[in-house]
Image (cartoon, rainbow, N blue to C red):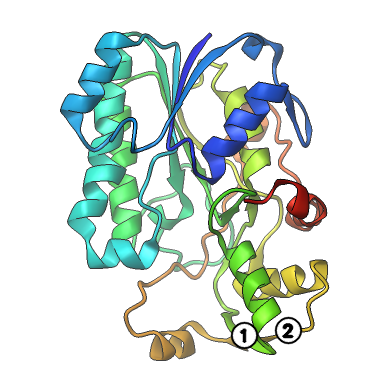
Amino acid sequence: MRILVTGAHGQLGSEIRRCLATMEAEVGPVPPEYAGARADFVDCGELDVADAAAVDAWFAEHEYDLVVNCAAVTDVDGCEADEEGAYRVNALGPESLARASARQGARLVQVSTDYVFSGDAPGERAESDPVGPISAYGRTKLAGEELALAANPRTFVVRTAWLYGYVGRNFVKTMRRLGMEREEVSVVCDQLGNPTHANDLAHEILKVALTEGYGTYHVTGGGTCSWADLAEAVMEGFGLPCEVVRVTSEEYKRMNPASADRPRFSALRNGRLADAVGDEMRPWREALAAYVARFDELSR
């Protein structure tokens, strides 16, 4: 199998690389179809997905069976400040990859986000629920979904949430750092979602990509919590005495007026994943405990 992974230096791309190199994920073996796969792992320095001409030139020299697009602008507040720039990467990038992969008959996995939903209703969102992003990040990622699906009929859109991995920056690492520096930290307590271990997500993406069930999937860690709940679990897991001060979204906005709006209820239900290939995503506390246990070994 010939595979291209974009955004390969990030949290998810790094875990896909590790899964393919070892043929193992933390939850179990990688499907044997990937044995001996030839994979190109590229980041923006090698391939700028926002540059359509560069994408076409790359595909003119390489052929693939599967493309996994992990490249994205994920700084939610940064997207708010430069929505046009975020659109080029998060929307036009997937479209260019979809067109190029379609010409080769390759499958595309477009990684997306829970932020495509407005989050104004309690409960878990299903794949078929109406979308309505309230931030520039959510709008640009939704556009990427739509453009990719339109340009390549063999596209899987995989929405995930609250992602953390061993490589790069994320909320869990930030809380660990702040917990080592401060006696207390203020964290929002009324936004609910699903913390997701990047290694688990990588494993499920590789499973889904072997099917012909194209379309949209939700793939997140099991269970729902608030950002404050997650922060407390991080402090406990790493043995840090830092107190988590719970604040409302309104209180946080007053403290950080330039921050983008976030959905209140963005938990996702892995319904289609369970039906198609089985849901092996770990409960979020179990996955976080495993992450903490391997943090010193794998974090960078």
Horizontal and vertical percent position of residue 135: 32, 64
In the rendered structure, which disc, 2 or 1, sits on the residue that comes first in sequence?
A: 1
Quarter residue 273 falls in: top right
Q: What element carries label 1?
A: strand
The reply to whether dot 2 and dot 1 touch (C-beta < 8 Å) is: yes
- Residue at 43 percent across and 44 percent down: it is 112
- Which of the numbered marks, if any, corresponds to residue 242? 2
Q: Is mark 2 on a helix, strand or loop?
A: loop
Q: Which of 249 and 287 is in front in this view?
A: 287
- Residue at 25 percent across and 11 percent down: it is 60
- Residue at 71 percent across and 46 percent down: it is 298
Whole-number angstrom distance, CA of label 2 to CA of label 1: 7 Å
Local packing at callout 2 (Cα closer than 10 Å; few below 14, some 14-19, many 20+) is many
Horizontal and vertical percent position of residue 180: 70, 77
Horizontal and vertical percent position of residue 128: 46, 42
Local packing at callout 1 (Cα closer than 10 Å; few below 14, some 14-19, many 20+) is some
Q: Which of 272 and 89 is in front in this view?
A: 89
Q: Nearer the viewer, residue 219 or 299?
A: 299
Horizontal and vertical percent position of residue 225: 67, 66
In the displayed structure, would residue 231 be above or below residue 203? below
In the displayed structure, would residue 185 be above or below residue 101? below
- Which of the numbered marks, if any, corresponds to residue 185? 1
The kind of residue on which mark 1 rests is Val
Left or right: 213 as drawn, with respect to 64: right
- Which of the numbered marks, if any, corresponds to residue 146? none
The kind of residue on which mark 2 rests is Cys
- Residue at 53 percent across and 86 percent down: it is 248
